Amino acid sequence: MASAAFALTSPAASAVAARSKVLGGGKSQGRNGCRVGITRKNFGHVMMALAVDVSRFEGVPMAPPDPILGVSEAFKADKNDLKLNLGVGAYRTEELQPYVLNVVKKAENLMLEKGENKEYLPIEGLAAFNKATAELLLGADNPVIKQGLVATLQSLSGTGSLRLAAAFIQRYFPEAKVLISSPTWGNHKNIFNDARVPWSEYRYYDPKTVGLDFEGMIADIEAAPEGSFVLLHGCAHNPTGIDPSPEQWEKIADAIQEKKHMPFFDVAYQGFASGSLDEDASSVRLFVKRGMEVFVAQSYSKNLGLYAERIGAINVVCSAPEVADRVKSQLKRLARPMYSNPPIHGARIVANIVGDPTMFGEWKQEMEQMAGRIKNVRQKLYDSLSAKDKSGKDWSFILRQIGMFSYTGLNKAQSDNMTDKWHVYMTKDGRISLAGLSLAKCDYLADAIIDSFHNVS
């Protein structure tokens, strides 16, 4: 309802109808969720209704658009044929179309044939999924699984798993701080802020080399208060695509162990980065092999393309079976009022694929193909930049990065130019999603990057 409403009436019956329409029968009515008080005044044949109460939501400000999801909204509104959406991390085919894995379709068909029901899952999720996801992460023969040292809860993809773990940290480690890489995935800080868990950043990206600031990272981990939680990207660091080497992972583990910190891995791209499930889980397995207690959040959005199914897990590797039991019981207690129990469809897809040797093999082949397409696009972009840029700038950092993202080194003004002039939609930190790029578009993107880098300060 507007702040004032006017209705023309006749002196008799029309006035009653107008009064009912404009004033809701003379009672206070809500519009769009707000309670509005009405005052009526008659001026001859004109009845005027004035709103006199202020909305109870008057103090609620407009939220800013999401920095990642807002990119897609802006892209959709652009009518230019050359536009590219390199913002959201979702895999696309060479034709830049969404892709549903063939093995997922096969698993869904089998589910339909079985006629499985849609009953509630337990709070901890589907047992077959929890078994499969822990084994996929740690290796089926890992002693920590055989000894019952892993507490696993199915949760709402990576975001939900991180949020559940954050609530656990806030409740049982209220004085602890979480260390987050600078930069990191845009939602990490939101998650810990919302859970009221304090955080600080450790150095990670070196703009001078467009590589890893390893010395700064180690120094900040060593300087953090003892017992801090250190959030690590298991593979394919988002947004930089820069991962530590195996030797650097060993030294990171040394520093964390020495300060009695708790490693907390976010594993969103297992199998999707290198094409190998085992290789992409090697960082997590290194820490577990050392006997460390570890948090690990998992997601199947990327490696199985189950973006909308919201399927993932939170795993906690503990020092003893009874500790794992207690941790799991409290995670369930936190999940109950948060979302009660997780969805079943995606969990069955994962469990069926991982549990069937034939489908599991098909999935690994499809993952290799997806990872391979991104590697080819990465190489082609590098080749285009090197051929077109006559300044002598070294673009080889693009080849040293891994996964679906590339951190271009472009600043906000340069990223704005990419969008405003070239219709290339990306996050303002210079991150581009190579999963949304085709080989055919690499030359165009190279022109946009070169122009933005050299001509915009």
Image: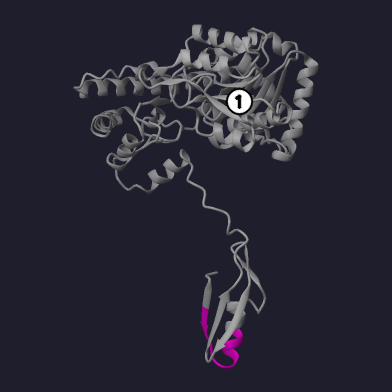
**Residue 12 is a magenta residue:** yes
Residue bearing the label numbered 1: 178
Quadrant (top left, top right, bottom left, bottom right) of the C terminus: top left
Regarding residue 6, the answer to whether it shows in the image is: yes
What residue is at 63 percent from the left and 14 percent from the top?
138
List x then y, in percent, for residue 225. Answer: 62, 19
Q: Is residue 38 left or right of residue 417?
A: right
Of 156 and 333, the residue lying toward us? 333
- Name the residue at the right extreme: 322
List x then y, in percent, for residue 150. Answer: 71, 18
Q: Which of the 4 image quarters holds residue 285?
A: top right
Which kind of residue does numbered mark 1 sit on? Val
Q: Residues within 10 Å of mark 1 (few under 14, many from 20)?
A: many
List x then y, in percent, for residue 34. Answer: 62, 63
Secondary element type, mark 1: strand
Regarding residue 118, the answer to whether it shows in the image is: no
Give the residues in magenta. 6-17
Look at the picture and state if 314 lies above or below 335: above
Of 147 and 209, the residue lying toward us? 209
Look at the picture and state if 171 lies above or below 397: below
Q: Is residue 427 left or right of residue 146?
A: left
List x then y, in percent, for residue 163. Answer: 63, 33
